[in-house]
Image: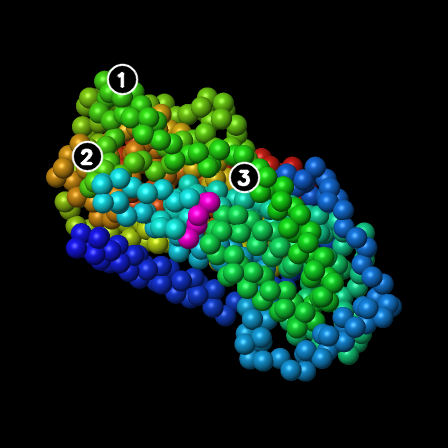
Amino acid sequence: MKTQTKLNKIFLFVSLLAIGFAACKRDLKERTANIEALNPINADTNAGNWKPILLSKPDEFAMDAPIAVSSPDYKLELLEIKSRQNQITDAERDAMEYWASGSVMRWNEILRELVAKYNLPPYQNADGTYPIPSAANPFAYPNFPFSNPPYAARAYAYVSAAQYDALVAAYHYKNVYKRPKPAETDKTIQELIPIAKGYCYPSEDAVAAGSAAAMLTLLFPGEQEFIQQKLAECKNARILAGANSRSDMDAGEKLGRAVAGKFIARARTDKAGSAVGNATDWAKFESDAIAKGETPWISQESPKRPPMLPLFGKVKGFFMDSAEVASQRPAAPPSTNSDQFKTETEEVYKYSKEYNRTNLAIVHRWADGVSTYTPPGHWNAIACEDFIGQHWSEVRWARNLALLNMAMFQAAICCWDAKFAYYNPRPSQVNPKIKTWTGLPNFPSYVSGHSTFSGSAARFLGHILPSKAGDYDAMADEASNSRLYGAIHFRSDIEVGLTMGKAIGDKAIALAIIDGAE
């Protein structure tokens, strides 16, 4: 009977979260409906000279020369395109138009969808403990991963950075081998979508797809069948469109996977796998805060849930090592015994008891909680919407998303380092009269994750699109304030988090200035 009751609770819990995920999927489709085909104003044919992130040089991974366009085998590839163009189904045409909008953007959407699907906190065991997802057994409950904000920030960074390095390598080889587009070799081939200027071997779409598929298989191992289906769909769409031959696509996928392998090796040693910590770690954070004479954070869930990824501040980012993270940690928050802390608590209480339609709309607009693609995903959605109108090449899309997401990944590391260095309580913990307007995250309060993510994203996006810098700053301020309006953060949390995020965004800008793309 007890087992059945528990199963019923789990079913209800998962069902409610599934409703949120379905809404998130609808939101993704609505955001990206009727997007015109990617038709870059500047093909960035010199991108093979841009500075990659992990690759030592663009040709670090060798690529075989393509077969000659005059060879019988290549003529068979062209014949495949023509014969298939004569019998395109409606589903294939839809897929062709979908992928024509840009492979980098579409894989970013797919990643956001997977983050939302797996952003599910595990339900407790019968004994009041909580199970931990295991990469070794991703199909067992709870499914691996739990794509909470730090995990998601890391995933966005690795996928987009791998795509960028793979595309730098691809553009290098395009200029080495100079294979013309299929329609330039056979005039009877139709180009059914706009096709960027330049050479076609290897296919930039296949490179982006191959690198993304390899990274996503590591990050979401239970989704291999879905990932492979999307990869095949992408490759098929480019062949049907007359954009690439099969060897262009196969070579691109191979190169993308090879470059992703370097990022996979890094990810396996970046300490994210041990970020969950253990009972000894969790107890020490609390005892250290008490030893300092402060009120420690305590989980407000019942039964008490261990804190979310308490050792994530030790994870290896792309901009700063652990020593620099610790050295640049923000100053301590107001003491829990101070008058300032009492004043800030009273301010939160005021927001918690005073209904305000405008503030509540802001709270929900930026909530980004369970079964969503998280705050970093929210900023990816904002960026992609704005990038569409810029008519960039695939490699420039990848470069800009890579720097954006590396900044937010670093923001997660620095934010979590501060959270667990100070272990500050949430407002509703110190004043039980405070009722939040949204969900209460299960980790310490200082500094605000939303604020840190938003500060880093807004600062970098303002550099990329300076005409919108003011808009991004306003969004970051609103996202930050939403956590105060929602009664889940103190003012110190959001102000310091926003400042810290902007400083991290500046590090991304510093790299952008010297990478050759500007």
Q: Are marks 3 and 1 in contact (CB under 8 Å)?
A: no
One can see residue 62 in this view: yes
Residues at marks 3 and 1, CA–CA distance in whole angstroms: 35 Å
Residue at image position (28%, 60%) is: 15
For the residue pair 280 and 89, the one nearer the viewer reads as 280
Residue at image position (82%, 68%) is: 73
SS category of the residue bearing label 1? loop
Residues at marks 2 and 3, CA–CA distance in whole angstroms: 36 Å
Q: From the image, tell me which residue sits under label 2.
A: 429
Magenta: main secondary structure: loop
Question: Whole-percent x and y of residue 230?
Answer: 55, 63
Question: Whole-percent x and y of residue 507?
Answer: 53, 34
**Residue 417 lies in the magenta-colored region:** no
- Tell me the quarter of the image containing the C terminus: top right
Tag 1 or tag 2, which sits nearer the N-term? 1
Q: Tell me the kind of residue under disc 3.
A: Ala
Residues at marks 2 and 1, CA–CA distance in whole angstroms: 18 Å
For the residue pair 181 and 285, the one nearer the viewer reads as 285
On screen, residue 482 versus residue 247, left or right, reads left
Q: From the image, tell me which residue sits under label 3.
A: 267
| Magenta residue span | 135-139
- Tell me the quarter of the image containing the N terminus: bottom left
Circle 1 packing at 10 Å, graded few (<14), some (14-19), many (20+), is: few
Q: Are marks 2 and 3 in contact (CB under 8 Å)?
A: no
Location of residue 14 by image quarter:
bottom left
On screen, residue 145 versus residue 359, left or right, reads right
Q: How many marks?
A: 3
On screen, residue 46 versus residue 278, left or right, reads right
Residue 292: which numbered mark, if any?
1
